[in-house]
Amino acid sequence: GHFTGIKLGFEAGFEIAQLCNDLGLNHWEFIFGLVPWLRRCQARGELLKMDGDTLDFSDPHVWVNFVTNIAFRKGWGDIFAEGGPRAAAILATGQDLIGELYPAWGQASHWDGHGSFPSPYFPYWLVTALQWAMDTRDPMGGGHGYTTNIFGLLREIKPHDQIALEKLRAVGQHLYGTSASVDPFSGYEGKAEPAAFHHDRGALKDSLGICDNIFPMLTDPKADDFLMRMDGIEGRDLEYYLFQPASDLEISKEAFYRIGARIFTAERMLAIRNWGRSKATDETIIPYLEQPEGSTSPYLRERITLDPQRFRALLSEYYALRNWDLQTGRPNEACLRALDMDEFLSALE
């Protein structure tokens, strides 16, 4: 009920969550996509029932029926099993509401500052917006690193604590090469660097099978300089030192972390080959981001709406950082050769 406003009580909520787990259903789509969309439709008198079955989500029995029908594609459950965007198209109902809740790729709002999960506030959602723009699904399955480390740290800082803010800026300079990457007053500056960093780290930790919410372990609000360390090892290097004793592969730390960039670039090349991925594809998130953000920065004290022109410039900045073509969003020859990915060069022809 914390996010949906629906008060089912702990026991009913727990049982429904376990039912979803047993049936292999995605909690996030229900809580931040499908059900919020249905409730917005219902607020204007639409989709109150399906084939005579009530969809009153204040009733736990309705939830059980709802998730079970979806899991087994039973009756109207077959429609909702397609997810919110496709269900809206099939039913020709509530299509105007989908764009408020689904950033891209048919998946619901997740750490993008908008929709039904309106966090973080500007300018931090610019980084997660870049993560969304470059992915093919909800990027937060492996991309919580920036929000947990930077926005999480920021929530421990009081807005008027200038000493802490200077320490935070030093963290940004140390981790991403620019203090603007974490500065609450920085606007569009310095957001490409952390987006690329966490794209690569996300690809790597997905391959290692380590916890997305824990790694990379970059910051510690209790440390004097806000940087995580364990037994003298800096937090940003911990994946490497966990990998070493578990593998007989002799590899340098630099080569190890370069694997993340190789994986991310390979995924981009496959998307280009198989589906014609392009800069135009990346820009499809812009209309969603043009909605007013869902929360207000205590530093800026106003809600910010995306400037599409500046976001397109930020996309170009991201492409340049990776050695991708600025017009097409495709990795160029220099990028592929630098990553020892010559086998992909033929795809550029």
Image: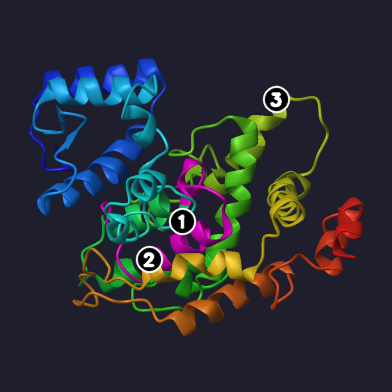
Q: Mark 3 and mark 2: span between their CA atoms?
A: 45 Å
Question: From the image, which quarter does the N terminus lie in?
Answer: top left
Q: Position of residue 157 (x, y in %)?
A: 26, 61
Q: Residue at x 66, y 71 (%)?
A: 319
Question: From the image, which quarter does the C terminus lie in?
Answer: bottom right
- Residue 69 vertical placement versus 283 (above, below): above
Q: Position of residue 308 (x, y in %)?
A: 44, 80
Using the image, tell me which numbered label, if any, was put on residue 245. Answer: 3
Q: Residue furthest front?
A: 51
Along the viewing direction, whichever of 299 and 139 lies nearer the viewer = 139
Using the image, tell me which numbered label, if any, was put on residue 288. Answer: 2
In the image, what residue type sits under mark 1? Ala
Q: Residues within 10 Å of mark 2 (few under 14, many from 20)?
A: many
Q: Which residues are magenta?
A: 116-145
314 relative to 57 in the view: left or right: right
Labels 1 and 2: the sequence-earlier one: 1
Q: Position of residue 263 (x, y in %)?
A: 72, 46
Answer yes or no: is residue 175 visible: no
- Residue 59 vertical placement versus 141 (above, below): above
Residue 78 painted magenta: no
Q: Residues within 10 Å of mark 3 (few under 14, many from 20)?
A: few
Q: Residue furthest bottom?
A: 309
Quarter of the image for residue 248 reads top right
> In what element is the residue under mark 3?
helix
Labels 3 and 2: the sequence-earlier one: 3
- Residue 83 vertical placement versus 119 (above, below): above
Labels 3 and 1: the sequence-earlier one: 1
Residue named by callout 1:
104
- Contact flag, marks 1 and 2 (Cβ < 8 Å): yes
Q: Residue at x 26, y 52 (%)?
A: 116
